[in-house]
Amino acid sequence: MNTTTTLGPAPLRADVLAGVRAMGPWLAGVTPFGLVIGVSAAQADIPAFAGWLTGPLIVAGSAQVATIELLDAGAAPAVVVLSALIINLRLVLYSAAMAPHWRHRPRWWRLMAAYLLIDPSFAVGVARYEQPGERSRADAHYIGGAVVLYAAWFAAIGAGVVLGAQLPAGLRLEFVIPLFLVGEVVPKLAARATRRAALSASGVAVLAMAVPLHLGLVIAIIAGLAAGLLTKEAG
Amino acid sequence: MSVWLVIALVGLGSYLFRVSMVLLVDQFGLPEWMGRASTFVAPAAFAALAASAIAAYAAGLDLLQAVPPLGAVAAAMVAVRLTGKPYMAVIAGMPALWILTALAGV
């Protein structure tokens, strides 16, 4: 069982560095994603700095993509906000999973640690929290991994914004994000419930393109969730 | 509503999601269905975004002009299917788009 004691700086530094190392494989995956988001932000019809700002403010690649794509398409603001927040609903689940581990920490620490919570930091953090030992060392591990992740994420988006603004329109880089999304979906089609969720969502998205205010996207995501949940229950 | 305000609202909402259960878990439980639904959020959202973006891209094109984007999507799907690597969609799809565009002369 985890316990809480006050540790000196040396063990904590080692745990921070262990968290940084554990984040390494994730960085290889998320850095190109950050670059792609930066390039698409530079190509979109929004201020380049606003595109970069989605990094530190939203800190969630898929929601950032949705926000940039929908703003570029001229969707109604409420639809942009609703769509992005639906995508980010999973953060509530991550928050619930981390809550017991952080209960011993002061409120300011929990507020700060929650800002750093996203898929890779959650995965790296939970893996360490599940191991026995000092709870404060697991906290240091989480913070180390999350901070290096965020630094790399912001830098990658910034590099993409700078690079994207200098690339010619003939490269048709606006097609990078749809292709990226295809790449994210295809491996998930192997599982029956997920396949139904993805196919239902994509079918409804195309059929509902004429729905005003780009609300078709929200309808499509909800249809996909419903299809996945129903399939899961049936199976 | 400005672009800046939209991004700020999405950011604020996302942070509230992150911090919600950390501060409230002692008082509230989490519905069971929500845990199951989370599995499908990313694939459903990504599929919906991809399908609508590709459909919007190809909507105003005639058959010949639609070949490059649809061919690029097909190349991306095959590449990911064969390698299992999501990033191969962009690596295979973008060159396919450029080559097919050049061949089609559009």
Image (cartoon, rainbow, N blue to C red):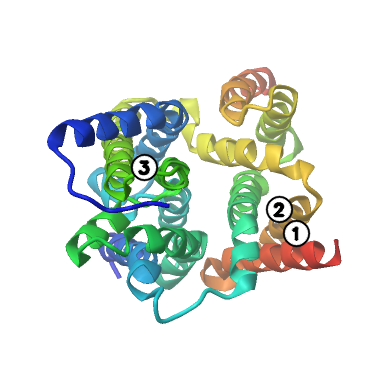
- Position of the C terminus of chain A, as image quadrant, is bottom right
**Residue topped by disc 3:** A41
Residue A129 higher or lower than A153, as above or below: below
Q: Mark 3 lies on which chain?
A: A
Marks 3/2: CA–CA distance:
25 Å
Q: In the image as oriented, which residue stretches furthest toward the left?
A: A9
Label 1, residues with CA under 10 Å away: few <14, some 14-19, many ≥20: many
Label 2, residues with CA under 10 Å away: few <14, some 14-19, many ≥20: many
**Residue topped by disc 1:** A200
Rendered location of residue A143, percent (x, y) = 28, 43
**Residue topped by disc 2:** A198
Of the image marks 3 and 2, the number of the one nearer the N terminus:
3
**Residue at 40% over, 45% down:** A125
Which-is-in-front pick, marks 3 and 2? 2
Figure label count: 3
Q: Is mark 3 on a helix, strand or loop?
A: helix
Marks 1/2: CA–CA distance:
6 Å
Task: Say what amino acid the circle numbered 1 marks.
Answer: Ser
Rendered location of residue A151, percent (x, y) = 26, 36
Task: Say what amino acid the circle numbered 2 marks.
Answer: Ala
Rendered location of residue A64, percent (x, y) = 41, 50
Front residue of B23/B61: it is: B23
Give yes or no for contact between labels 1 and 2 (Cβ–Cβ under 8 Å).
yes
Marks 1/3: CA–CA distance:
28 Å
**Residue at 49% over, 62% down:** A93
The lab-note entry on whether marks 3 and 2 share a chain reads yes
Which-is-in-front pick, marks 1 and 3? 1
